[in-house]
Amino acid sequence: MLNSVIVVDDEASIRTAVEQWLSLSGFSVQLFARAEDCLAQLPAHFAGVIISDVRMPGMGGLQLLERLQADDPDLPVILLTGHGDVPMAVEAMRNGAYDFLEKPFTPQHLLGSLRRALEKRQLVLENRRLHEQADLKSRLETTLLGMSQGLQQLRRQVLDLANLPVNVLIRGETGSGKERVARCLHDFGPRADKPFVALNCAAIPEALFEAELFGHESGAFTGAQGKRIGKLEYANGGTVFLDEIESMPLAQQAKLLRVIQEQKLERLGANQSISVDLRIIAATKPDLLEEARAGRFREDLAYRLNVAELRLAPLRERREDIPLLFEHFARAAAAKLGRGAPPLSGAQLAQLLSHDWPGNVRELANAAERHALGLGSPNIEVAPAGQSLGEQMEAFEAQCLRAALRQHGGEIKAVMEALQLPRRTLNEKMQRHGLVREAFVERE
């Protein structure tokens, strides 16, 4: 239950009395003698109620109400009025005030109005939270595409971890989308408006690694002309994505560990420590603990990085996502050319579903772009790689259902007619393949 209350009144005796009544009833109270001070110190998205006198020197309660309403029309404001101000307060309620209390008022009257206002505030904030979660989920579904159980679980994990202040290790094969997932962890969390800095540890020569990560002062080494801000310092307040972390030199691993532990770094050639606020997201293909046992990676750093782990399944383990991803990439490529994406034949779809996709999503995107250009998809072989006929048929059935649902905008009756399926059979198949009608309904 919310319990935050701000009281604004220029009379010290009123402030003291109200604070005593509310504190004894378990409320958290903050006092202001001036409305201007209240506005200056009001936290964003204040989760409580404001009680304000109407007549005060400088900005009065009605002006304060108007300013508060402009920022948050649902913020409850209870006005305290003298006898002559009652008509004015009634008009203020028509303009958005929650309630007004005529002085002198009893503690019971104040507490009753306050509790009702806080209950309303709680409902409003909960409703906002649910809407925000739904919006985030919808945005994430268009960023991390896929209907497989693994992708649905990954999206849930990303939404959960995005708001937690923990380092994350992403494990997955080459081309499986590790940087995209890292970007989602940043974009859907509280650091979204701060820098996202991506660094491929395998692409930096070892001799330049320390300067790239930590920066340097002028003259720190031969050729170091002028001061340079390193990637970690540049990302202050935001997120650093370290791809192929297993390639980081051991000497730099020790320095990165210190940054994580102390949230401080030193540029090359400098003696002064710089405080940084960073979230580290690392990505790797091998198991870091196995790398540590082999002496190629620091075990203590592995544990620091792997506070939470996300595993990205290779494309061959989520074949039901292949048609959706292929269609997305083909449409995007065709749109750049100002043309429509050519349709897939049954044979081409079977070929896509049978291919092993060693390059994962990156390879699939390349094949889709070639298809959109009319160049075909060479290098794709029909190689089930252990996938049974039943599994291939299941994947093909899921694609047929998805295509019909998309074509008819989620209209179940039209899908039944197109596929010549009874309602019960269609429902069972949709449930088995994790398809929901709402995902295909066109939103205005």
Image: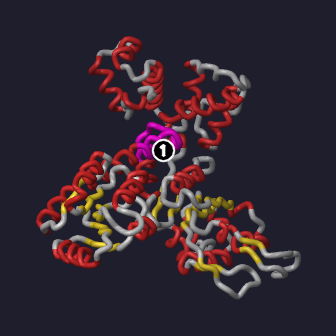
Where in the figure is residue 317, as x and y percent of width and height?
49, 42
Image quarter where the C terminus lies is: top left
Residue at the far bottom: name it: 271
> Which residue range is magenta in the image?
135-153
Q: Residue at x 70, y 33 (%)?
A: 379
Q: Residue at x 43, y 67 (%)?
A: 36
Tell me: 286 left or right of 89.
Answer: right
Classify 402 as above or below 252: above
- Callout 1: few (<14), some (14-19), or many (20+) C-alpha neighbours within 10 Å? some
Where in the figure is residue 75, as x and y percent of width and height?
33, 55
Tell me: 436 left or right of 154.
Answer: left
Image quarter where the N terminus lies is: bottom left
Residue at the far front: name it: 84
Q: Residue at x 62, y 63 (%)?
A: 242
Q: Residue at x 88, y 75 (%)?
A: 223
Q: Pointer 1: what residue?
A: 140
Where in the figure is residue 418, as x and y percent of width and height?
41, 12
Tell me: 363 left or right of 129.
Answer: right
Residue 137 magenta: yes
Q: Nearer the viewer, residue 155 or 136?
A: 136
Residue 266 magenta: no
Residue 292 found in image quarter: bottom right
Looking at numbered disc 1 in the image, what kind of residue is underneath it? Leu
Classify 347 as above or below 324: above
What kind of element bears circle 1? helix
Q: Nearer the viewer, residue 306 or 77?
A: 77
- Is residue 171 visible in the rendered image? The answer is no
Residue 64 found in image quarter: bottom left
